[in-house]
Amino acid sequence: MNDIAAPIQTAALLSSTLARQRQAYFAHPVPSLEERKADLRALQRFVRDHKDAICDAISADYGHRSRHETLLAEIFPVVDGIDHVIGHLRHWMKPQRRSVDLRNFFGARNRVIPQPLGVVGVIVPWNFPLNLSLIPLTYIFAAGNRAMVKMSENSRHLAQLLIERVPDYFPPEKLQFFDETGGVGVEFSRLPFDHLLFTGSGATGRAVMAAAAQNLCPVTLELGGKAPAIVCDDFPMRLAAERILFVKYLNAGQICTTVDHLWLPKARIAEFVDLACQIVPARFPNLATPDYTSIIDQRSFDRLLAALDDARARGATLVQLLPGPAFDAATRKIAPHIVLDAPADSALWQREIFGPILPIRGYGTLEEAIAVINAGPRPLALYPFSNDPATVQMLLDRVMSGGVSVNDALFHVGQHDLPFGGVGDSGMGHYHGEEGFHTFSKLRPVFYQARFSTLKFMMPPYGKFADRVLAFLTK
C-alpha cells in the first residue's frame, strides 16, 4: 500500500463503519433495559474469558507490565464497574419529572427523557488501555449507543486481541476496534460522531477538539495535568509516605492522575526522604522484580532520563530509592527517584512527568504552595493530606482541580459513583457514575400539552383580555 493509498483506505474503512453503525442506530434507536444489560454482561464476559490473554498482551506492549497492576487497575475496575452500572441502570433510564408553569400551562406535563445519542467515538491512550476503553464503553452501552474505538500505537498487542476476539461478543454494527497503523487517529477525529471521547495529552486533545469542531461534534476530553500532593504539618508523615509512594510508583508513574509532585513543610523533607528509602526497597527489591513495570517505549525512557540529567546538571539532588543501577536499558526500567531542589524552569517542573520520578518542593506556609499551583494550568487532581477539616476545605476552596482524593491519592478515580473529569487544561466533561450515563445520552426535554390549553385565549387578534392577562403576568 503506497503512502497516498493508505490514508484514503483508512478513511474509507472508518467512514463505512460509521455509516453501518448509524444505519443500525436508526433501525433500532432505543434499546430496552434488558438489551443494554445484555451488552454490558457481554462486555464483562469478554474480560473474564480473556483475563490472562489481556494481561499478557498489555505486558507485551509495555515490554513488561506487572500482572498484579493490570488486574488491580484494569481488569477489576471494568468487571466491578459493570456490576455497579447494571445495578443502577433502571433508575438512570427513567424519565425525569419536571415542574410546569401552571399559570400558563395548567394540566400539561414536562419530562426529561434520556435517549441514546447514536454512535460514539473513543480514542484510547496506552497507559491503561483496557480500563480507558472498556469503562467508557460501559457507560456508552448503558446509554444505548454504539461505538468505534481507536487504540494507541503503543497498544498493538492488545489492539490485535480486541480486534480478533471482540467480534465473538459484539457485531461490528454495535462495536468495532481499530489499531493505530499510522494516520488512523487523525482520520478518526474527523468523523462526524454523535460524541467523541479522547483521553491523552493536552496538545493532542486540542487537535482532536479542533477536528471535531468541523462537524460540531461534542467532545469529552480527559487530559493530563501536574497533580500535586500537599502534606500538611499535622498529618503523620509515615502514613503519607506509604500512600503517596504506592500511588507514585504504581505502573512506574505512568498514570495521568498520579502524584506528579509533592509539597512538604520544609522542616520535614528529610523525614519523608528517609521514610521513602525504607518503604520503596521493601516493595521493589530491585529493578528485576516482576512487580515493577517498564517504561512504555524508548522515546519516553529517553525523555525521563534526560529530565533527570537536566535536574542534576542544574544543581538538583537525586535520591535513587533502589539499590543497583539507576536504570536498565534492556527492559526500559528506571529506578524510583526523588528529586530535591530542581529549578522551577526544569523539565521536571514544566511538563507532566509520567514516570517514576517524584520532585519535592518545600513550603513555609500553605499560601506559598497555593500561589505556585494556581499560577499554572489547573491540574487533573489534587491530593491534600491533613486531619484538620478546615484546612482540607480551605485547600478545596482555593485550588481548583478535576478531582480530589483527601488523605490519599488516585482513588477518587476508582469510585464508581463519582464523576471523573478534568477542568481547564486538564480536560472537560465527565464520565463514570450517573454523569457518565448522562454524558452519552441526550437528556431530551419533552412538553406534553393538556387536552385543553389556556393559551387558546391568548391567540391573535389580541384584545383587552390579552392585555389584562399579560399585565398580570408581567407586573
Image (spheres, rainbow, N blue to C red):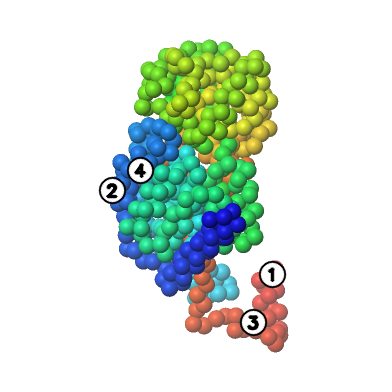
- Expressed as whole percent of the image width and height from the top left, the position of residue 328 reads 46, 22
Tell me which numbered mark, 4 or 3, is placed earlier along the sequence.
4
Report the mark closest to the observer, 3 or 1.
3
Whether residues under marks 1 and 2 lie with C-beta atoms below 8 angstroms apart, the answer is no
Mark carried by residue 49:
2
The residue at the point 39 percent across, 50 percent down is: 162
Mark carried by residue 123:
none
Q: Quadrant of residue 322?
A: top left
Q: Quadrant of residue 158?
A: top left
Mark carried by residue 474:
1
Decide: is 168 above or below 472: above
* Of the pair 9 and 471, the residue shown nearer to us: 9
Whether residues under marks 2 and 4 lie with C-beta atoms below 8 angstroms apart, the answer is no
Judging by the rendered image, the residue that carries numbered circle 3 is 458
Tell me which numbered mark, 3 or 1, is placed earlier along the sequence.
3
Left or right placement of residue 386 versus residue 48 in this view = right
Tell me which numbered mark, 3 or 2, is placed earlier along the sequence.
2
Q: CA distance from mark 2 to mark 4?
A: 10 Å
The residue at the point 50 percent across, 75 percent down is: 448
Q: CA distance from mark 4 to mark 3?
A: 66 Å
Q: Quadrant of residue 102?
A: bottom right
Judging by the rendered image, the residue that carries numbered circle 4 is 54
Whether residues under marks 4 and 3 lie with C-beta atoms below 8 angstroms apart, the answer is no
